[in-house]
Image (tube, coloured by chain):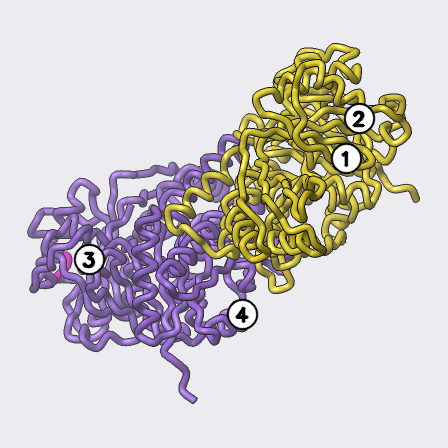
Chain colours: A yellow, B purple
Amino acid sequence: MRRRRLVVQKYGGSSVANPERITRVAQRVVAAKRTGADVVVVVSALGDTTDELLQLAAQISQDPPERELDMLMATGEQVSVALLAMAIHELDEDAVSFTGAQIGILTDGTHTKARIVAIPAQRVVKELAQNRIVIVAGFQGINLNQDITTLGRGGSDLTAVALAVALRADVCEIFTDVEGVYTADPRMVPDARKLTAISYDEMLEMASLGAQVMQARSIFVAKRFNIPIHVRSSFSQREGTMITKSAKAMEDIVVSGVTLQRDEAKVTIRDVPDKPGMAAEIFRELAGKGINVDMIVQNVSREGSTDLSFTVVKSDLPSTLRVARMVSHRIGAGEVTTDEGVAKLSIVGIGMRSHSGIAAKMFESMARERINIEMISTSEIKISCVIRKLHAERAVRAVHRAFGLSRERVATHRRPAAMLGA
Amino acid sequence: MRRRRLVVQKYGGSSVANPERITRVAQRVVAAKRTGADVVVVVSALGDTTDELLQLAAQISQDPPERELDMLMATGEQVSVALLAMAIHELDEDAVSFTGAQIGILTDGTHTKARIVAIPAQRVVKELAQNRIVIVAGFQGINLNQDITTLGRGGSDLTAVALAVALRADVCEIFTDVEGVYTADPRMVPDARKLTAISYDEMLEMASLGAQVMQARSIFVAKRFNIPIHVRSSFSQREGTMITKSAKAMEDIVVSGVTLQRDEAKVTIRDVPDKPGMAAEIFRELAGKGINVDMIVQNVSREGSTDLSFTVVKSDLPSTLRVARMVSHRIGAGEVTTDEGVAKLSIVGIGMRSHSGIAAKMFESMARERINIEMISTSEIKISCVIRKLHAERAVRAVHRAFGLSRERVATHRRPAAMLGA
């Protein structure tokens, strides 16, 4: 017997910020249910709840135990699921809410940024079979010790995608405050276009390049288990952007989007001895401190030494400097300098693989605007350039234009912001 | 090997209303721990959290499903336990917090007023063995279906007493915003005296007669398993009132306290046919609607019928009237009238059992004040009178004086209020 269509929907904090909005979400959920589908809903904490809870904790301890932080944070989503269940009951549908622990969302033991290990589907399946809408608290799970864990940034998206995997859902709908994924941040590029479809790989690059629509970890899981994701607005009925294996409609388009990150800083270690193992030593130490290094550029050696530059997110800069200075001293390298006046502009597109001259076109478009490129790094489906932050927005518009991304105008809508890095 | 002394402490919502107070509670908990005892702490939700959550629910639904209400309410205590654990860590003691579900506090399925069925001690014992302070969310548990339940009014006290039973604790300390149990409400009787000890039975009567210090259900459990309860203030270091099996120090005192309830109304059914089963029919119907009837008085029959009066709490008055009118019609009785201008004054004391003339002394003291008594009911250790509400406070002072309860003056303290009914 073919089972009913199964939809997992996820609503972010701004979609459930107050009772009125919760009721609106309930209407959407009920509408989906009344199409005849089974519906599982994942909800984040109401509006600013998480920040408020963190502030409360900060008044008590500057360095609270992470287990207790998770215990505290997890209440945010528990409030949301209970209220949404009530709102759905008001609309005469049966709904039942669950914490991550009740479903048995099993994670590893890394408090505040746990990884999902397994989601048993039984309880959800049982409730769906009774024609109920199932509401699950996002962002949270339990470890083997029955302690409550939270999944860190983008955790609710991850809960939704992982549930979609566990339940073999037909689609995972991510409701957010933007209309979908854009070719560039519309606040920066007014004629940026909403993509109707994009591939997992492109979205993965975009996410790690500053597009704030979804975190890379959720897209990675969706890709691995081939779960279609529909990113759309909770404030409109319009279709958003489908993220799937191969976005056919997009295949004639070489570049899908332009992203910008302004939250990185450049670090340079001067006069690194040009012998094997030097770079390894530096980056091993940084990795040991949990610092993610992004772009790395090493110039050709002159007179037995070289300059090594890399970028890190600004918040990691103080610890990066400490480590870099220590290692530099140990290996006999020179001064360590930093530069926070940089931005990273990237183009992303599966089409790049089969097209030549993409890099040249990108560099030319910036050269025409007299914008200097300080670092370059490429992958199969993206090219990133570090430039002066001062010129960043102008560069984004130039590149966006060069690749013809603005062919159609976007319909007017509430808040189109989508792809800007911090 | 004799294990260490084990103390269960319970702090109410006003004791943990803000970060500053939570830190003060942490200091008290740590002080207890540093006497060498094992310490288990039960906490209520912060200040007005529960009311705020209920308001949020009310904005969404006038009649929310009780399962979802419990899901919502339970977050209040979860926030408290996490914050208290953090505050204790700040004081360099190891603490670990648990929800009711994590401990496995098993209740029946009656949402919003569940009864505790069992508390497995393993997890708590294991954590105590590691020299940790264990913090447990009050007021909540889970049913066999893993749904979150709450215990209703006085639920956190019940969690504390039940944990004390499960762990065979040496004492259960109930920290509150009053200094202990008083001979009368000090707001009404300025020279009321704090009792150093009181028996379970007396405290049970007092609780059900309007003393707000503790709910009867917790005292009942403590009595059944003989767990000493120490009711004391979280704002002072003074000893409070010990509730134990037989309060030796009190045995020469005939009456322990005077209580007053102002939240009841009198209902009278006129001309009830004087034949067997009439009263049973009325009270069976009321019980079926979950209405607790308190005092019942039936006058002697005249001309084949009688008037039947009883009291109920005011909030039950509308449903009581509906039921009473329906039954009155069915059994051929007369008009149903109500009177909300009444109050119930009671005296409680184990000493009554062996002393005669107590009732006479009580009635005389009121007669001297020209206060009329409308209904009387007695048990082995209490006598209650329904009087005009207008005269209630004067009556309390008169009775308190008549039984010599004001022998010592109470030390000045922050907020001595203790025993007033609503």
As shown in the figure, which amino acid type bears the numbered disc 3? Val
Disc 2 + disc 1, Cβ < 8 Å: yes
Residue B343 picture location, percent across and down: 24, 46
Quadrant in the picture for the C terminus of chain A? top right
Q: For mark 4, what is the residue?
A: B123
The label shown at residue B258 is 3
Same chain under badges 1 and 4? The reply is no
Quadrant in the picture for the N terminus of chain A? top right
Disc 3 + disc 2, Cβ < 8 Å: no
Chain for disc number 1: A
Q: What element carries label 2?
A: helix
As shown in the figure, which amino acid type bears the numbered disc 2? Ala
Mark-to-mark CA distance, 4 and 3? 42 Å
Residue A35 picture location, percent across and down: 79, 29
Q: Does the magenta stretch include residue A42?
A: no
Q: Is residue B362 magenta?
A: yes
Residue that lies at the very extreme toward the right in this rendered image: A1
The image quarter containing residue A254 is: top right
- The label nearer to you, 4 versus 3, is 4
Mark-to-mark CA distance, 1 and 3? 84 Å
The label shown at residue A378 is 1
Q: Is residue A408 left or right of residue A95?
A: right
Mark-to-mark CA distance, 3 and 2? 90 Å
Question: Which class describes the residues within 10 Å of circle 1: few (<14), some (14-19), or many (20+)?
Answer: few
Q: Which residue range is magenta in the image?
A: B361-365
Q: For mark 2, what is the residue?
A: A359
